[in-house]
Amino acid sequence: MSSETNLPAVTPARVLAGLCLAVPIVAMLWVASYSKADPELGGMPFFYWYQLAWVPVSAVFTVGAYLLINRDEKARKAARGGDAL
């Protein structure tokens, strides 16, 4: 049990995963950056297509965060002497 307490709670992978989750949130909450009509894309104002473009981008960031956390958990399990599968 003592080896578990020696593992750091904050690792670079966890920080990067947090940043991956924060990027889409900050981008969508910063409304002043996209509250305009131009440039249009296929007749759709920038305000709308910019938000729609963030749907797949957010999914990519979320998958990246998941993979980072999953890899970090496997490394923690291996460091504790458990099975790393």
Image (cartoon, helix red, strand yellow):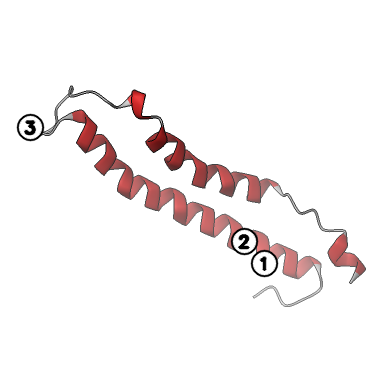
**Residue 77 place in picture, x, y as percent:** 73, 69
> Could you tell me which residue is drawn at 40 percent across and 30 percent down?
30
CA–CA distance in space, label 3 to label 2: 43 Å
> Could you tell me which residue is drawn at 20 percent across and 29 percent down?
46
Q: Left or right of 24: which side holds 39?
A: left
CA–CA distance in space, label 3 to label 1: 48 Å
The image quarter containing residue 57 is top left
SS type, badge 1: helix
The residue that label 3 is drawn on is 43
Q: Mark 1 or mark 3, which is nearer the start of the sequence?
A: 3
> Could you tell me which residue is drawn at 92 percent across and 67 percent down?
2
Tag of residue 71: 2
Contact check, label 1 and label 2, Cβ < 8 Å: yes
Is residue 17 positioned above or below 49 on the image? below
**Residue 21 place in picture, x, y as percent:** 50, 47
Is residue 3 positioned above or below 56 on the image? below
